[in-house]
Image (cartoon, grey):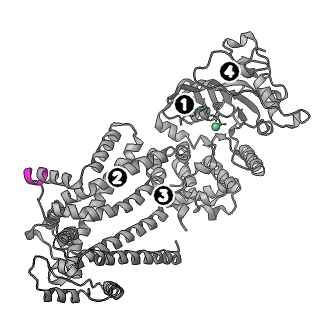
Amino acid sequence: MTPVLLLQRVGHLVPVLLGVTVIVFLMMSLTPGDPAEIMLANQNATPAQVAMLRHDMGLDRPLMERFVSFVGHALQGDFGQSLFHRRPVATVIMERLPATIELSVAAMAFALLVSIPLGVMAAVYRGGVLDRLATVGALLGVSLPGFWFGILMLIGFAVNLRWLPVSGAIDFAAQPPGITGLMVVDSMLALRGDSLMNALAHLVLPAITLGLPMAAILMRVTRASMLEVLRQDYITFAEAKGLGRGRIIALHALKNGLLPTVTVAAMETGSLLGGNMVVETVFGWPGLGRLVVESIFVRNYPLVQAAVLLYAVTYVVVNFLADLLYTVLNPRVRM
Amino acid sequence: MTEPLLAINDLRVAFATPHGLVRAVDGVSLDVRPGECLGVVGESGSGKSVTFAAVMGLIRPPGRIESGSIRFDGRELVGLDRVDYRSLRGRDIAMTLQDALTSLNPALTVGTQITEVLLAHAEDLPSGRHARHREARARAIEMMHLVGIPAAEHRLGDYPHQFSGGMRQRMMIAIALSCRPRLLIADEPTTALDVTIQAQVLELIAGIRATLGMSVALITHDLGVVAEYCDRVAVLYAGQIVESGPTASVIGAPRHPYTAGLLASVPMLSNLDRRIRPIDGQVPGLVDLPPGCRFLPRCPHAAPVCVSTIAMRALEHDRAVRCVR
Ligand SMILES: Nc1ncnc2c1ncn2[C@@H]1O[C@H](COP(=O)(O)OP(=O)(O)OP(=O)(O)O)[C@@H](O)[C@H]1O
Ligand SMILES: [Mg+2]
C-alpha cells in the first residue's frame, strides 16, 4: 500500500472517531437527572457544593459550548478531575492502563497460540479424536460465562492447590522498578528473574479466563476456514507438484485460511475490552477494567466517560490495524 | 513393441456417497507409450479426471482405489507410500488441473509457486541456499519463457489474479513442466480459454513435448483436438473404456456406436457435409449399474446380447472395442 493510500485510510478514521466522541459526550448529557447531584448523592452535599461542582464540570453552559470544550480538552488529554481520587482523570487512567494492556495482550496471545494450531489440526485431521475434543472444548469455551470459569480456576488452582496466586498483578516484594508499567516487561528490563516468574504466575489465570472465549471462537473460525481451503483446487495442485505436507498446510493453506481468523480476532478485541471488567474484578487485577467498574458504582462520570472513549478509540484503531494486516495477507485486496 | 511408460490395468475407483457407491472408474485399462500423445475423451462425468487423479495418487476419501494396477516405468503406483509418491509427482509425472483459474494459490506469488517445485525436486541445483534459489529462479524464468509468458523475469513477483486466464493456464503448464517430467497429464487444458488461445496452448504443449521428448496424456471432450494433436485415443463412457486405437483409424472408422455418436456430434473436416447430431439420451448414473453394455439405452444398434457383460475386444491394427458388433 502506498503512503498516500495509507494516509487516506487514516483520514477515514476521523469521522468515525468524531462520531464516537459525540456519543460518549451525549451519554452523560442525556442520562436522566443532574450529573452533579447524582455524583454527590449520599455525601450530604449542600446545594452550594452541588452548584459549584456543576460549574466546575461546565454543566451550567450550553450543550454545544460544552461539547467543543470537551473535545478541545480531550485532544489535550484532559478529561477533568476524578472527585473520587482527587486527581486528574487522565492520570488515574494512565496509572491503571499498563496492567490492562498487559492482561489483554497476554489473553490475546493465549487465544491465538491455542486456537490457530488447534483449528488447523482439527481441520487437517477432520473427524479425528483431536477434532472432536477441540469442537466440544470450543462449545464449552463459548457458552460458559467467563467469570464462572475464572472463579472455578481460582478456587482450583489458587485457593485449593495453591499453585498460583489468588489476586493482583505481582507481589509487593517482587515489584520491579516501574518503567513501562508492564510487570513482565519491567521485570525483564530490571533483569529480575524472580519478578518475572512472579508476574507470569499472576498473569496465568486471568489471561486464560479472559482469552478462553476468544480462543474458542477463533478455533472454530480457523477450523471452518481451513476445511474450506483444503478442498480448493490449488491445494490439490500443490499436492500434484509433489510438495511436502508440511509446506502445503503451513504455507499454501494457512496463508489463505488465516484471513477470517484475523478479521474475527480484531472484532473480538472489543469483547476482550468488555471482558476485562469482569476478569479484572474477579482476579483483583489493578487495571482499567476494574477501575471502570468501581467508578460506575461511585458514579464517577468524568472517569467513565474518558474510559469509554478510550475503549471506543482502541476498538476503532485495532480494527483499522486488522484491515491493514488483511491487505498484507490477501494480495487480492492489496492496492 | 516398446514397454509403455504408463500402464493402467483394470483400475477401479469408487466414491462412497449418500446415494450409494459411485464407481467412477470401472475396469479401465490404458497405456501411454514413451513419447506419444494419448487423447482421452468422453462426456462430462465419464471418469477422465478421476482416472488420472488415481495415477497422481490424489484420490481422497470418500474415494478409494478398489483394485487394479497403475505402473509407471515398470513401478507399481497403487499402494505406493506417501514419501515415494511425493518424489514422483511434479518430477517424473506432472499434471495440470482442469481449472487454471482456481489451481494457482491466490495468496502466493507465481514465482514462489514455480520455484518451489524446482527446490523440492531438482537434484542438480547447486548447493548453498543462495545459489540454489538463484538457479531455481533462473530455470523458472526459462520455463516461463518457453510457455510464452512475456517479460517473465518481471512477473515472478506477481500474484495469479494479475494474470489473464490464458496466462494462468500457461503458468500452470510452466509449473508442471518445470522439472521436465517424463509424463505430462493435461486435464482439459483449454476448456476455460477462448478459441484462439486454446489453439496456442495446444500448440505449446505439442511443441514442448517434441522439445523435451515427454509423453502426454491429453484429457479432453473435444474429438477435434484429439484428431489434431494425439497419436492414439481412448474413449471413456460411464467409467469404462469403450474404444481405443490410433487416432486416424478410430476417427476414420469408429467401431463403437458411442464413438460414432461423438464424431457425429462435433463439426470436423471429415463430416462437414453431414448434419451435426447430438447423441440422444443421457449418461447413466454410476450407482448400481446393470452388467451389460452401458451405452445400451442410447444405442441405435441394441441387440439382446448387449445385456450380458461385454468385454474389451482386441482388433487388428492396435485397436480395441467394447462392443459385440
Ligand atoms: N469427490 C467425489 N465424490 C463423489 N463422486 C465423485 C467425486 N469425484 C468424482 N466423482 C464422480 O466421478 C465421476 C467421474 O468424474 P470425473 O471428474 O472423472 O469426470 P470427467 O470425465 O473428468 O468429467 P469432466 O469432463 O466434467 O471433467 C462423476 O460422476 C463424479 O460424480
Ligand atoms: Mg474432468
Frontmost of labels 1 and 4 is: 4
State the CA–CA distance, disc 2 to disc 3: 43 Å
The chain to which mark 4 is attached is: B
Say if labels 1 and 4 share a chain: yes
State the CA–CA distance, disc 1 to disc 4: 29 Å
Q: Give neighbour class at mark 1: few <14, some 14-19, many 20+ (Cα, 10 Å).
A: some
Task: Evaluate if marks 3 and 1 touch, with contact meaning CB atoms under 8 Å apart.
Answer: no
Q: Give neighbour class at mark 2: few <14, some 14-19, many 20+ (Cα, 10 Å).
A: many
Task: Name above or below for residue B116 compared with residue B96.
Answer: below
The amino acid sitting under disc 4 is Arg
Does the residue tagged 3 have its C-beta within 8 Å of any atom of ligand 2?
no
Task: Evaluate if marks 4 and 2 touch, with contact meaning CB atoms under 8 Å apart.
Answer: no
Quickly name the residue at label 3.
B128
Residue range of the region highlighted in magenta in the rendering: A156-165
Frontmost of labels 2 and 3 is: 2
State the CA–CA distance, disc 3 to disc 1: 33 Å
Task: Name above or below for residue B86 compared with residue A1.
Answer: above
Of the numbered discs in the image, which one, if any, rests on residue A217?
A: 2
Asked if residue A139 can be seen in this view, the reply is yes
